[in-house]
Amino acid sequence: MDRSLFRLTASGASGLSFAALCFVFLPMLAGSYWLSIFTSAAIFAMAISGVAFMYARLGMVSLTQVGLMGLGGWVTLRLNHLWDLPFEVNMVLAALATMICGWVLALPALRMRGLYLALVTLMAAGGLEILFATYQFPNGGTGFWGVKIGSTAPFRRPALAQSPEAYLRYCIAIATLGFLFIEAHRRLFPGRAWALIRRSEAAAMAAGVNVTLYKTWAFGIAGAIAGAAGALLAGSLGLLDDGTFRSSESIMLFALAVVGGARFWLGAVIAAVLFRVLPGLLNTWGVDTDLAFVIFGAGLLHALITAPNGIAGQVHDLVAKVRGKRHD
Amino acid sequence: MIEIDAVTVRFGGLVALNEVSARLTAPVAGIIGPNGAGKTTLMNVVSGFITAKSGRVLVEGQDFLRLAPHRRAQGGLRRSFQKEQIADDLTVLENVLVQTDWSLTNARAKRAEAMEMLAVVGLADRAHKIGAALSGFERRLTDVARCMAGRPRLIMFDEPAGGLSVEETRQLGDLVLQIHGLTGAQTVIIDHDVELISRICAETLVLDFGRRIAFGPTAEVLADPKVKAAYLGTEEGMQ
């Protein structure tokens, strides 16, 4: 099994094919309501990939991902209304800001694990939630917080993606790059270090792995991914609402990452579909969207009892089984 | 050469190591003793997982106790654990490459070295096999290959023969005997298998209740009545 950087695995090929199909067909087929939902789903799939990667590769539970998305969105909105920088520059700066925030968040992670780490990250998410609720998101006002009462100043979308259809394609492309960014790390020396850290921190240290550095690195990556996702969300709507970034949403995001399957790209996609598309479907059918929570709960029970690798893990096993039968 | 100088470790009121000193100079040296004697504690002190209350550990003259565990590894210290530590989701080759990833050496050279070490342990043909698919002995051999990679100066094995068959233990012993010639590293091995120790270790340190009770050429040490007493609990040992 060769894991060189550019080797295309069956899973990778199916992931890229799926992204290409979504890129081409989703904007063509969806109306304005579904365009908005699919855009949001693509953005959250990217954010989920960050939290899933932390869990799958290092066994670390981060419940701050949605809060960091909010921070990324805040930075993007603030920069958008402050200077005339292109969207991409604002997005990179937002990702850098949340990456640094991820590093700061990593400080307690170096001493804690399991439930305690999860609680610390949840407290950080709670802190961000209070900040967002108190100061709101920039909308073209003056001063540090950039908030004004009344109409919102215009938001500059990416030059490549002015229409909703183009913006969905843009989000799918950026989300795919996010997935590839994580996969590249997994295939190179950080991935090897993380695998050994997950196996045993003592063994990793005995192999010369700087555990502090690599744990911080992982938090930084998840933070940067969340920041970029937050920037895309800001670009999608042109403004953000503090209700989107409640700490409970981070818990939901992590739970759905487990339900979907944290080790697989498909898991993040399933989680995003459950998180964004399912409530949209229920709404279309005239069913109370709170029913989604019942479905999430059932999915979580299913994952905890019968599918430790999530739904994507089950799909993966099924495909392997079918392939095995074909080879027999 | 590894010089252990008056190393003392306390866990609360328990003295796990009591001013243990020894100068291990043989290419392959052993540390033996009954359960709870302090063998693994000594190894943990050398590798940095336990802080000694006092004492020094010099590896080729360098004081290792001042360094963080990963810095010791980067400085040439290698160790294995009682339970092999192979990452299930990495290939055999990747499990070896981890050992040299920190180094700035050319990636191709590191890969070539890892493959060379896998050839030495007889796993070159399984280099791309995933860790989860390996047998217990293959996992142990991967561990040995990892310890041999990256110009080690001192390799410590903690009960490497645990759970292995007689034939596998013999193979492992042969492999350990090759390490000095191949890498120049000194090997220190902890094991309960006295036959293995007497076959491969030129000198042996014996610990009991955290104290050094014997040290010297292995044959002489194993013939020492105090050592026999520590293992078998004779009347002399009770006195």
Image: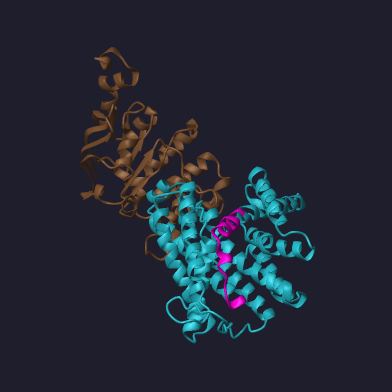
Which of the two residues, B147 or A252, is positioned nearer the viewer here? A252
| Residue at image coords 67%, 70% | A19
Residue at the farthest right position: A285
Instruction: List x then y, in percent, for residue B216.
Output: 24, 31
Instruction: Say whether residue A70 is left or right of residue B175.
Output: right
Q: In this view, does B21 lie to the left or right of B175?
A: left
Numbered range of the magenta stretch: A235-255
Residue at 26% x, 21% y: name it: B226
* Picture colour for chain B: brown
Q: Does the magenta stretch include residue A62?
A: no
Task: Report x, y in % for residue B59.
Answer: 25, 47
Q: Where is residue A204 in the image (x, y as percent from the top left)?
A: 42, 50
* Nearer to me, B179 or A284: A284
**Residue A4 visible in this rendered orientation of the protein:** no
Q: Residue furthest front?
A: A149
Question: A282 or B206, which lies in front?
Answer: A282
Residue A41, above or below A120: below
Q: Is residue B110 above or below residue B17?
A: below
Does the magenta segment cover residue A241? yes
Instruction: Tell me which secondary structure the magenta stretch mostly adopts.
Output: helix
Front residue (pair A212, A292)? A292
Quarter location, residue A172: bottom right
Quadrant holding the N terminus of chain B = top left
Of the 4 image quadrants, the one containing the C terminus of chain B is: top left
The colour style of the image is by chain
Q: Is B160 on the left-hand or right-hand side of A51?
A: left
Q: Is residue B111 above or below residue B60?
A: below
Q: Residue B41 sits in which quadrant?
A: top left
Chain A hue?
A: cyan
Viewed as shown, does residue B38 lie left or right of A141? left
Residue A317 appears in the rendering: yes
**How many labels, in total?**
0
